[in-house]
Amino acid sequence: MQIAVSAEFVSAAADGSGSAGAVVSSQSVTAAVHPVCWYEQSDTGAERAKYIDSPMATDYMSTTRGDTWDDYKARLPDYESYADDTEGRWYIPVCDSRYMADGDERDFGEVMADYYANNGPVYVPAGSAAPEPVVDGATLARAAWDAVTIPTATIGYNPMVGDLQATIVGWDTWVWATGDTPKEVRVTATAGPVSASVTATASMLTLQPKDGVAKCTGFGIPWSEDNDRIGTDCVIVFDRSSAHFKDNVTPVDVKVSYAIEYTATDGATGTMDTHTTSTTTTIPVAEIQALNTRPTKQP
């Protein structure tokens, strides 16, 4: 079935371009999702009654399934009432592990057993609506999350010296999240009677510069004279200029990792594997040249 998925992105930026803590962008997409368990059309009332009353069915139940005959009949309430109906249909519960989402850590056997315990066969007279397929909350949450594209991080930095806007070797280069870099993602979707909400949160940038060392415990703040007195939680110290790189800029890998939780109206709750966005940006790095001279003796 097709589902509508909505996502909101809460900005990590503190430089005014994204208004940190505000919802700065959103997505609305559609996705296809198949329930793990559903009802499937089976015999007419007459066909099933004939089968139940046949010796073949008795032998099959006792030798193959191990159920008692009374157990089997109990799952088909009032089957005798439909013994003459050649148009109405029984619908039986079916589960298939192929529709478990990637990364779904639930045990399929437990999912199937729980569904069968709460959803027995249903008789549908001709002209009546068949049972609607219901996507369980965990499956719905994963399908919704997989349908959303998470923006990668963008950054600003300081100092920015000269025409190249370069930082300097050996200095603390302040780095901070800009624009729509999300620190929180909120995803919602509904399929029939079930709604699911997914919340993904991140706490910092992860920076991997070439020719330097980064230390980030947050998303950084823009440099200013006032902020300089406070300090920042995200800096890079470059140990070499960009002169040996193409275009005279140093590559910096930028990652953000999100912890993911979900809840659903059918009572499902859980977590998903950490999701990490990754991109590479560049920062020009320059050296400050100094001339050391030996003092001359004064006459």
Image (cartoon, rainbow, N blue to C red):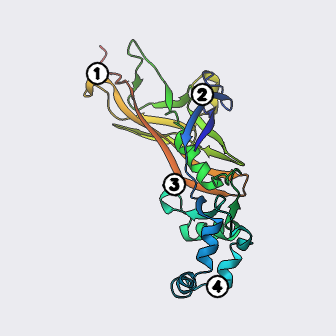
Q: Tell me the crowding category of disc 3: few under 14, some 14 to 19, or many 20 or more residues within 10 angstroms, Cα based.
A: many
What residue is shown at x 61% (from left), y 38% (from top)? 5
Q: Amino acid under label 3?
A: Ala
Q: What's the mark number on residue 247?
A: 1
Q: Please tell me whether mark 1 sits on a helix, a strand or a loop.
A: helix
User: Which residue is depicted at the point 61% across and 84% down?
Assistant: 67
**Mark toward the viewer: 3 or 4:** 4
Do labels 4 and 2 touch, CB within 8 Å? no
User: Closer to the N terminus: mark 3 or mark 4?
Assistant: 4
How far apart marks 2 and 1 lie (CA) works out to 30 Å
Badge 3 is on which residue? Answer: 101
Secondary element at tag 3: loop
In the depicted view, which residue is nearer to us: 256 or 81?
81
The residue singled out by tag 2 in the image is 228
Density class for disc 2 (Cα within 10 Å; few <14, some 14-19, many ≥20) is few
Q: CA distance from mark 1 to mark 4?
A: 79 Å
- Please tell me which residue is depicted at 47% across the width and 23% down the height of the picture: 159
State which quadrant residue 266 falls in.
bottom right
**Within 10 angstroms of label 1, few (less than 14), some, or many (20 or more) residues?**
few
Closest to the observer, 171 or 124: 124
Image coordinates for residue 57, horizontal then vertical, percent: 56, 81
Marks 3 and 4, how far apart at CA: 36 Å
- Which tag, 3 or 1, sits closer to the chain's start? 3
Q: Where is mark 4, residue-wise?
A: 69
**Whole-percent x, y for residue 44 in the image:** 62, 63
Label 4 secondary element: helix
| Amino acid under disc 4 | Trp
Going by the image, does 243 lie left or right of 23? left
